Amino acid sequence: MLASLAILAPVALLVGLVWTGSRGATALAASPGDGASTAIVLTVAILFAIVGFNVQHISSVSKSLDAQIRTSPLSRLELFLGTVGIPFSVSCLALSILSLTLFVPLSYAAGAPLHTLVHLVLFEVAVFYAAGVVGEVLMRVTRRQPAALLALLPLMASWIGAGIFTGGGAWPGIARPLGHAILNADVEPALELRIALLFLLLVNVGVWVLLATLLSFPEQQTFSYVGRRLRPPNSRFGSVLSVTLKRIGRDRSLQRHVLFVSVVAGMVSGLASVLLPGVAPVALGGVLLLAALSVSVVPLATYGTNQDSRWLWRSAPVSATTYVLGMVVSGLCGGILAVVAPVAAATAPFLWVGRGLPEIGTVAVVVMVILLVATGAGFLVPCRLENATEQILSYAVFGASLAGVFAAASWTAPRLAVLRIPEPLIGAGLVLTITGLVIAAAFLRENEWRKG
C-alpha cells in the first residue's frame, strides 16, 4: 500500500496542478494592469522561501551525524555539500519542475514566449537558495554567531540591483518585469532580464556556500535559556503545563521557525498593503491564516517532543487525566504564544499605512480551530522536530483533519443559520466540539501508550 501511495501521490499531484493551472490561466492572462503579475511572482517567491527554509532546517549539517562521518577526512565544503547541498538542490529541482505544471498553461494562454519559463525557473532557484542562506543565518545567530548577519547584505543588494537593472525598481525588485514577461503584459528586454536573474542566482548560491564553508559549524545547542527561571506552581496540573511550556520555549529550532514566519508575514503584509489596497483587509486575513498554519508546528510537535520524558511523568504523582489535560492545554497555549509575533509583524504594516483590519472575530475563530486541530493531530500521529518522516506524516494527518473540519463547518453553518442561531454561537460551538475531539484523541492515545 505504501508503494502504491508513493507512485500515485505524485501523479495525482501533477494532474491536480495541471487542472488548476489550466482553469485559472485564461482569467489570470486577461487581468488588467501589473498588480496581478507582480502578485503572482511575489507569491511564488514566498512559497519557495518557506519550502526552502524548511528543507534547509531538516537537512542541516549541525544535526547529530555519525562519528564515522565526523572523523572522516572530508573538507568542510564536502561535508556541507554531502549533507545539505545535494539534498537541497534535488528538492529545488523537483519543486521547480512541479511549478511548471502551473505556469505552462498560464504562459500559453497569455501568449508569452518560451524563454519566460526559463526566467521563472531561474528566479525560483535563486529564491530557494536565498531561503537556504536565511536558514543558515538564523541557525547561526541563535547559536551566538552574529557575524552571519552580514550575509544578508549581499542578498538585499543583489535583489535591489537586479530590480534597478531591469527597470522594476528597488522595492519590488525583479518581480514586476518578470511578472510582465509571464503574462506578456509588456515587452520586456529578455537579455537584461536573463542577465539580472543569473546575477541574482550566482550571488545567492555564492553566499550560501561561503556562509556554510567559511564560518565554523556552530556548536550543537538544542535548548536555550528562555524560560529557565519559570518555576512550576504548586498544583500538579500547573506543573505539567509549566514544565511542558518551558521545554517548548527553550527549543531553538522552534525559535528560528517562529522568527522566520514573523519575517515572512511582515514582508507579505507590507507588500499586500502597498500593491493590493482594494482588498487590503482580505489580504491581511490571508496573511494571518498563513502565519497560523506556519506556527502550527508548535502544538503539532508538543506531544512528540515530550515522549522522551514519559519516564518522569510515569514516576511522578500525576494522574493520567491531569497529564493529558496539561499536555493538551500546553500544546494549545504554545501555539497561541507562537502566533503572537507573526500577527504583530503582519498587522504593523497595515496600521502604518492606515489600511483597514479584517473581521477580528472570524480570524480569531479560524486561528483557534487551526491550533486545536494541530494539537489533536499531534496526539494522533506524534512527531519530533528532528525526525523528518514523522513530521511529514503528522502534517498529512493535520491537513486531512483540517480539511474535514472546514468541510463539515461549511456544510452545517448555513443550516444552523436558517434556524436563526447567531453566528458567534456557531463559532463557539465549533471550537468546543473540536476541543472535545482533541481531548478524546489525547485520552485514547495515552491509554494506548500505557497499555503498551
Image (cartoon, helix red, strand yellow):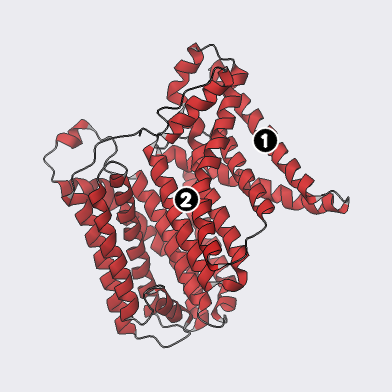
Rendering coords of residue 439 (x, y %): 64, 30
Which element carries disc 1, helix, strand or loop? Answer: helix
Most extreme residue toward the bottom is: 187
> Quick one: label 2, few (<14), some, or many (20+) residues within 10 Å?
few
Give the residue at x 33% y 48%.
138
Residue 1, visible in the rendered structure: no
Q: Tell me residue 41's x, y (percent).
A: 45, 70
Kindly identify which residue carries mark 1: 435
The x and y percentages for residue 374 are 57, 40
Marks 2 and 1 in Cβ contact (< 8 Å): no
Q: Is residue 274 above or below residue 406?
A: below
Farthest residue, direction right: 419
Does 361 sit left or right of 39 as displayed? right
Q: In the rendered view, would you say 118 is above or below 370?
A: below
- Amino acid of disc 2: Ile
Mark 1 surroundings within 10 Å by alpha-carbon count, few (fewer than 14), some (14 through 19), many (20 or more): some
Q: Find residue 167 and name its label.
A: none
Which residue is at the front of the view, 268 or 89?
268
Residue hosting label 2: 7
Badge 2 or badge 1: first in the primary sequence: 2
The residue type indicated by label 1 comes to Thr
| Residue 450 lies in quadrant | top right
Q: Residue at x 45, y 81 (%)?
A: 180
Residue 131 appears anywhere in the view: yes
Q: Residue at x 50, y 43 (%)?
A: 338
